[in-house]
Amino acid sequence: MKIMKPREASKELNVLRALNQRQAYSFEQKQNLLNMEKGLIGERQFDEMGEKYLEQECVMLQDLSLTIKGNTVQIDSVLLTSEVVYIFEVKNYEGDFIMKDGDIYTVAGQEISNPLTQLNRTSSLLRQLLQSWQVKMSIEGYVVFVNPACMLYHATPADPFIFYGQIQSRLTEINRRQRDEPWGIKKMKGLAEKLIEEHNKEGRIQIKRPAYTYEELRKGIRCLYCGKFDIRITQRRVYCKSCMQIISKDKVVISQIEEYFLLFPERKATVNNIYEWCGEKVNKERIQRILSTYYQKSALSVGTYYVQKGIVEEKREQSR
């Protein structure tokens, strides 16, 4: 199996991670962050199983975001084989659940969102996209429960569910069905490239953000590994007193700049603003050098600020 688009933490999750360290979180906010972290763990667990059991030539795209006819869909995993496109909606649910009349409830009677609803919507929209590209491949969609401690009562064999104990056998069966055909391999890689191209267009979509302001967030330098502010800075290195990691000073500053861009996409990244964002713990000369080296200058006179490389070209293309 070839992974042509690896999984990364979503922008929304990275925003929540940063805010968790830079402001006081409510119980509800912390629970939302924990649920997203748990979901990512489950998705990566499924990724590992795919790498282990899918030995034939096929292509995996992880965490794909597409806009189809004005509708945005997030797909946890897309597996392209020579004849079938497989969609996997991965859930890291834990506990006992009951399925009744097409809805899912906890044993306490609380209704939760049915992943089949999202799976059916995604399958329908992806099918329409492939038809518009004149790609004649069938689509099979499944909800994968990766947690062995999840039990869904009253589900039927006809439901497109794959439980933890079935993952190996299902992936092995897909592996067995895959044909090693040169034309099929070329077709699936070409389709993967088109889907990745569509995914890359989603960088301009606004993500869901909780309410926060620049003024209320804690300023300073966070450890790249544990996220804590408990650090000691020397001329060339940053030492984290919490997790004992030793990191290049430039690398740490770049991570703070990237976090600034993530949290404040509309706020200018000037030397003074980054200096303040880093808690005034790194001199302006170093910040100026790092910005000039790794980022793109957006003005050449008074009011100079910097953007991430590629942003200027993207804005020019949008204005044409």
Image (spheres, helix red, strand yellow):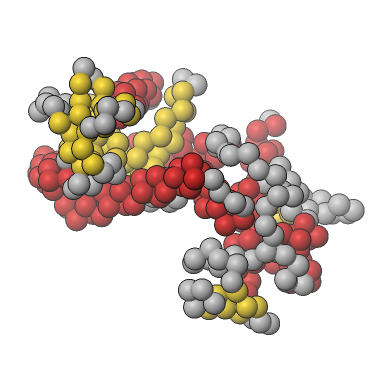
Along the line of sight, the residue nearer the viewer: 48 or 20:
20
Q: Position of residue 51 (x, y in %)?
A: 23, 54
Residue 85: image quadrant is: top left
Q: Position of residue 224 (x, y in %)?
A: 53, 66
Query: Quarter holding the C terminus?
Result: top right
Q: Which residue lies at the image location 26% right of the left edge and 22% below the top edge?
A: 103
Q: Can residue 172 be spotted in the picture?
A: yes
Residue extending farthest bottom:
235
Along the line of sight, the residue nearer the viewer: 10 or 314:
10
Q: Position of residue 204 (x, y in %)?
A: 58, 37
Q: Which residue lies at the image location 30% right of the left edge and 48% below the top edge?
A: 42
Residue 210: image quadrant is: top right
- Position of residue 70 relative to residue 270, above or below, is above
- Position of residue 123 relative to residue 182, above or below, is above
Q: Position of residue 91 (x, y in %)?
A: 29, 40
Q: Which residue lies at the image location 18% right of the left edge and 34% below the top edge?
A: 152
Q: Can residue 47 be spotted in the picture?
A: no
Residue extending farthest right:
302
Residue 31: image quadrant is: top left
Q: Which residue lies at the image location 74% right of the left edge and 50% below the top edge?
A: 215
